[in-house]
Amino acid sequence: MTAVTIRNLDVVFGGNVAQSLQLLDKGKTRQEIIDDTGDVVGVHDASIEVQQGEICVLMGLSGSGKSSLLRAVNSLNPISRGELLVRDGDQMVDMASCDATTLRHMRTHRVSMVFQKFALMPWLSVLDNVAFGLEMQGLGKTERRAQAMEKLEMVGLAEWKDKYPHELSGGMQQRVGLARAFAMDSDILLMDEPFSALDPLIRSQLQDELIELQQRLNKTILFVSHDLDEALKIGTNIAIMESARIIQHGKPEDIVLNPATAYVEDFVAHTNPLNVLRGRSLMTDISQLEQLDQMLVLNRNENTCVSTNDAGQVVAASRQGQPLPLHHWNEGDEVDALPEDTLVMATPEISMRDAIGIRYRTGQPVLLNESDSLVGVLSDKDFYHALLGKHFSASAA
Amino acid sequence: MESFVDWLTFNAAGFFDAISVSLEWVILSMVEIFQWFPPFVPMALTAAIAWALHRSIPLVIFVVAALLLILNLGYWQEMLETFVLVLTATALSIMFGIPIGILAAHKPWLYTVLRPILDLMQTIPTFVYLIPTLVLFGLGVVPGLISTIIFAIAAPIRLTYLGISKVPEELIEAGKAFGATPFKLLYKVELPAAMPNIMAGITQCIMLSLSMVVIAALVGADGLGKPVIRALNTVNISQGFEAGLAIVLVAIILDRICKKPGSSQEG
């Protein structure tokens, strides 16, 4: 089910919107439009669908229009042209054309927001800050404080409820911001670089907490970030923006494997692939393996071979003539508990980090099975290839 | 200009008289109420307010000592009259000044229009507008009050404007994003955020009102200004000093009490 649908959306700031839109249609650049009309194009021709329960990350450098697009979703920014539909129960509301009452209903019940600089009210206690949105919903004091308290406990700040925002560290303040947004009980959360102002350790901790909360509460999250590592870590989908346009939209792994432009490639080149890439995109396919006496050779130097039956199942493995034990590994199993000198079989969805861990632990290549039949092998060559970033330049060439 | 004032006096005399009479009644009855109490009641009240706001024993001692001194000098009634005048002028300035300041912050064109007027109101010698107010409202406390308001109202307008236009954009955005109506945005976000500035505006307004006391006395307003004028006319140095001292003491008391606890910001 889609939560947010954006079609051909333009956001233009300034006083000559109609004229600027015409210029945009003629293919003028942002700078030309600023020179001609003084208007700033925030977003141009953005189309994107966000499914319920997904974390969609809008990624780009500053000035790329990612925040402008995010702010259009709750109509903080004007929608100059195009459609922006947000789910309200069984229907979709067009934020571009809805009246003030509907807009307020959407803001108080459907879409809430977390800000980069926290935007907590300095004169309200932590508890009342969390209750701020509930107050806007029109809830009475006791009721909203009770609900706010619940959310404050959820982010682990219950004993700080009577403090004021300035008495809290940045990480804590943003937890209050999160609690305030969660307190609204809205299905859609907009997050505008919520962790950018925090130091790296706290940032990663809050990312983990966000992922955990999202899994528990199943919210739809639109998340703005300028950090591809963050986007890859938390995003179900990533939309990359450059000068007001969405230039690539896809799953994290797609973006790392197939960057659409040099701009995206630049981003990707500076990321850590360990958490993103999966076995399937790294492996050597079995069709490329050497065959010897009806056995597949995994490592010629050590003479490591496996034999498969007609269904493609691995039935036996040997190294230098000695049989090697086989072991099935499932995601979540302890890598360090694996016996050494074992051939491990895992799914092609295994993360690169786990696969390297297994290879390091067992000293053997990793076999990838799909519905019990062998599809590929991960050996050192595949790992080095990915670590050196050759996986996408090779396919791009 | 002259014909305009004549036209006003002629055509709107009833209106100005009504304002004059009702304001005078308010002020005189407030003075009477205060006077009905023996002096130590307002004294204790002021001390209690000082204690409640600042929890500072030296301040309370100072307030009591200063008020006792005024009582001893024989200016108790004048002090009350001055106090009521300042209070009324400040209340009216706040009543009009803060809404105007809020409006100006939201409508930039209004502030563009307002700014030269405010400058004019504060720089023009006060005697100049004392004359038309005298003509319109007659002799007594009301023209003094009106002149005081004209002089003092600029402070709350300016500082409210400043406070509201300085509210961080992200707080406004947060208010909107959580579905605040324009009224709630003003009431729950902008005003609380601007409160320190608005309070500074009010304190300043009180001080400016007090500084008009002597001038207001020229057109017949009662209060501590009267003995100063009398001393001036009779070249009575000691009386002038005593009355002047009383004004200074009232000013210090009001300033210390109004100042936000813990802030060193000048009021």
Image (tube, coloured by chain):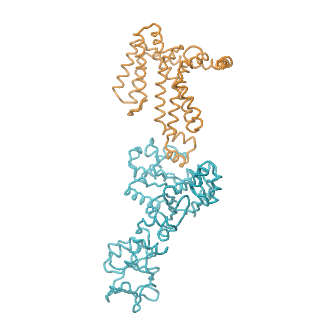
Chain colours: A cyan, B orange
Residue lying at 52% horizontally and 17% vertically, measured from the top left:
B216
Residue in the foreground of this view, choosing between A310 and A266: A266
Q: Position of residue B199 (x, y in %)?
A: 47, 32
Q: Is residue A249 above or below residue A37?
A: below
Counting from the top left corner in percent of width and height, residue A201 is at: 37, 57
Quadrant of the frame with the N terminus of chain A? bottom right
**Could you say which is closer to the camera, residue B256 or residue B56?**
B256
Q: Position of residue B207 (x, y in %)?
A: 46, 24
Residue B182 vertical position relative to residue A192 in the rendered view, above or below: above
Q: Which residue appears at 46% of the width and 49% of the height?
A: A148
Question: Left or right: where does residue A88 sit relative to residue A329?
Answer: right
Q: Is residue A198 left or right of residue A82?
A: left
Left or right of B66? Residue B122 is right
Q: Can you name the residue that lies furthest to the bottom here?
A: A293
Can see residue B231? yes
Q: Position of residue A392 (x, y in %)?
A: 46, 72
Q: How many marks?
A: 0
Residue A201 as seen in the image, left or right of residue B83 = left
Would you identify the image quadrant in which residue A332 lies? bottom left
Relative to B20, say whether A352 is above or below: below
Q: Is residue B191 above or below residue A26?
A: above
In depth, the one of A172 and A390 nearer the eye is: A390
Residue A143 can be seen in this image: no
